[in-house]
Image: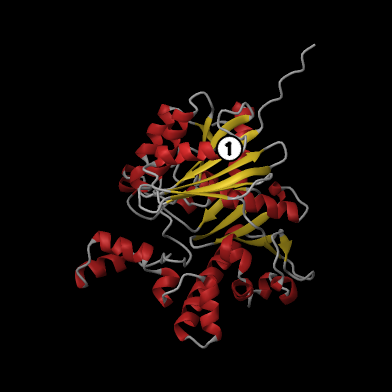
Amino acid sequence: MTAPTPSPTRVLVLNSGSSSVKYQLLDMADGSRLAVGLVERIGEEGSRLVHTPLRGGEKRVRSGTVADHAAALKAVAEELAADGLGLDSPELAAIGHRVVHGGLRFTAPTVIDEEVLAEIERLVPVAPLHNPANIVGIRTAMTLRPDLPQVAVFDTAFHTTMPEAAARYAIDVDTADAYRIRRYGFHGTSHAYVSRETARLLGKAPEEVNVIVLHLGNGASASAVAGGRCVDTSMGLTPLEGLVMGTRSGDVDPAVTFHLMRVAGMTADEIDTLLNKRSGLVGLCGDNDMREIRRRIDEGDQRAALAFDVYVHRLKKYIGAYYAVLGRVDAVAFTAGVGENAAPVREAAIAGLEELGLAVDADLNAVRSDEARIISPEYARVAVAVVPTDEELEIARQTFALVHDPAQEK
């Protein structure tokens, strides 16, 4: 009797940016990575592909112009094939695509067809920098493997559980609805993953835990997660709202825009560039690398100290606000580049919140580790955790679960 063919368990995760493609190939039988890579400067001089097989073999770098996303994905397919991991492998179950904006329609991972692509395209006006690149990556992958399920996992999906009171801006309802103006939130795959992993760290089910997640990278966002469901998040219509970030201002009085138009004669595009690319930490002190900012503070640099203080002040405000939204908090979880590695940021953000049951143990906070861990003292009523994020694994998990159980699709 012939043995049954084993079900495919591999998922290729693609994150297509305007001039780059990041990718990872994972085996969902055990969640392990088989290969990771990056194609950068697509369509520019100096394009290169960096590919790293993770089960033997050396890292490879391919230089030379990569004309477009189609050429980039073909090069990725060639590198994977060289390791015996090609896109034609029967072990490949699906391709999971990170899509930044899913609006209100997409509340879960979704198998992509032309109707889904058309809706992602309709959302381009609210995600002009991200959705077009996501679409190009999807169409190219569909051309390479038209027979394979392609799944969109949306940054905004985790936040679609926010109540209307949190999602609505207080502007004219008809205008808001006509132009899809509301708070969508971003970094959703990270917030979903970290909130679940924090519950696991506490030895509880996600449904039993209220968590404030602080995703602190060059882009930064906070979320209030009650029993596994997002009830508030700091980013809004776009990723500009909320915390102070590497180059983005975060919260700012909307009238600043009108003031700069009238008094400084700046155009809408110039103000857009100011708030998104020349603000935040880089606007305050000229650096968006927290390690460099801390070095400058140690040398007595006042601008760096001011940037750090503004960053932490905003962070502390959101912790307090989300504590109020949740009513009961079981943990505050720091994640992403700054959250996972900058002990001074964690210490300063929690300092003075002892009356809320929050504290940081200095020795535990100073430990460098890639593992999820508690950094609060045993007596603290609320756990403070460092939980490394893994957005690619989250995308792969959601993709694999959907293609094995289509009933999950909404």
Confirm whether residue 230 shows in the render: no
| Frontmost residue, 295 versus 350 | 295
Give the answer, above or below, for where 17 lies relative to 386.
Answer: above
Q: Name the residue nearer the viewer: 63 or 229.
A: 63
Quarter of the rendering occupied by the C terminus: top right
Give the quadrant of residue 251: bottom left
Q: Is residue 372 left or right of residue 185?
A: right
Picture residue at 67% right of the left edge, 50% below the top: 196
Residue that lies at the very extreme toward the bottom in this rendered image:
300
Q: Which residue is mark 1?
A: 82
Which picture quadrant has residue 88?
top right
The N terminus lies in quadrant: top right
Residues 182 and 152: in front is 152
Residue 317 on image: x %, y %: 53, 69
Q: Is residue 257 visible?
A: yes
Looking at the image, what colour scheme do you see?
secondary structure
In the image: residue 305, left or right of residue 328: left
Q: Is residue 391 left or right of residue 105?
A: right
In this rendering, the count of numbered labels is: 1
Residue 112: x and y in percent read 48, 31
Where's residue 309, x and y in %?
51, 78
Circle 1 packing at 10 Å, graded few (<14), some (14-19), many (20+), is few
Task: Give the residue type that dot 1 points to.
Answer: Ala
Could you tell me which secondary element the residue under label 1 belongs to?
helix
- Spot occupied by residue 382 in the image (x, y as percentages of width and height): 71, 65
